[in-house]
Every structure is written in structure tokens, then in C-alpha cells.
């Protein structure tokens, strides 16, 4: 989804992945984790903010990010809605705008 793409662009710039090989590897790992949602997305827990959403946690403390996503059963796809640092305030629906 557009918001998640913007989040990923922001994270990429924030961690300076273009000039730091470790940051670039971490970011590629995040993208791989997101891509893995194609297989068994139900294995991830329901987001406490909304029972219709799930989340994937990626990284190690203190650098853990939450990937908030929706499973579209009818369309048989996963929609990544938002990517955010886990230490931020609880996710709100208006965060998607």
C-alpha cells in the first residue's frame, strides 16, 4: 500500500542504508521478512489495536519495527498497511493517511 511504501522509503533514508553496508543488510532483511508474508501470514499475531489486522515484528531491541498488515482472504493476498518503530505510540487508523 502507498503508506507502507512511504514508510519504507523513510526508514531507508533514516538508517542511511546507502552509505552503511550493515544498515543496507538490515533493510534487505526487513524487505525479505515482508515478502515472506506471502506464505502463512496467519502465523503472525493479531495487532492489539484492531482484530482485523496482524503484525510482524522485525529486528532486535532496540531496533524493532512493526509491519502492520491485513489478510485479504477473498483476494488471497496480504496488504501491508504501515511500517513503524515498535517504540512509537499505539497504531491508530488515521496513521494510514
Image (cartoon, grey):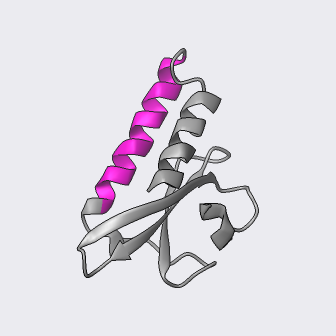
Q: Residue furthest bottom?
A: 51
Q: Residue at x 30, y 55 (%)?
A: 36
Residue 90's place in the image compared with 27, above or below, is: below
Residue 91 shows in this picture: no
Residue 93's place in the image compared with 2, above or below, is: below
Query: From the viewer's perspective, is 27 left or right of 73?
Result: right
Residue 17 shows in this picture: yes
Residue placed most toward the observer, 74 or 47: 74
Q: Residue furthest top?
A: 19
Image: magenta residue range? 20-37
Residue placed most toward the observer, 4 or 46: 4
Q: Quadrant of residue 41?
A: bottom left
Q: Picture coordinates of residue 46 (x, y %)? A: 50, 78
Q: Residue at x 24, y 64 (%)?
A: 39
Query: From the viewer's perspective, is 27 left or right of 47?
Result: left
User: Number of marks in the image?
Assistant: 0
Residue placed most toward the observer, 44 or 52: 52
Residue 48's place in the image compared with 6, above or below, is: below
Q: Picture coordinates of residue 8 (x, y %)? A: 51, 42
Q: Quadrant of residue 13?
A: top right
Location of the C terminus (image quadrant): bottom right
Q: Residue at x 43, y 60 (%)?
A: 80
Residue 91 within the magenta-colored segment of the rendering: no
Q: Picture coordinates of residue 53 (x, y %)? A: 49, 76
Location of the N terminus (image quadrant): bottom left
Q: Residue at x 64, y 31 (%)?
A: 14
Residue 24 within the magenta-colored segment of the rendering: yes
Magenta span: predominant SS is helix
Q: Picture coordinates of residue 65 (x, y %)? A: 58, 51
Amino acid at each position: 500500500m502507498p503508506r507502507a511504501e512511504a514508510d519504507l522509503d523513510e526508514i531507508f533514508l533514516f538508517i542511511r542504508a546507502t552509505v552503511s553496508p550493515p544498515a543496507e543488510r538490515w533493510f534487505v532483511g526487513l524487505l525479505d521478512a515482508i515478502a515472506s508474508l506471502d506464505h502463512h501470514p496467519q502465523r503472525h499475531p493479531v495487532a492489539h489495536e484492531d482484530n482485523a489486522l496482524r503484525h510482524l515484528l522485525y529486528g532486535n531491541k532496540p531496533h524493532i519495527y512493526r509491519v502492520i498488515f491485513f489478510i485479504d482472504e477473498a483476494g488471497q493476498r496480504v496488504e501491508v498497511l504501515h511500517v513503524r518503530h515498535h517504540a512509537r505510540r499505539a497504531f491508530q487508523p488515521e496513521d494510514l493517511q
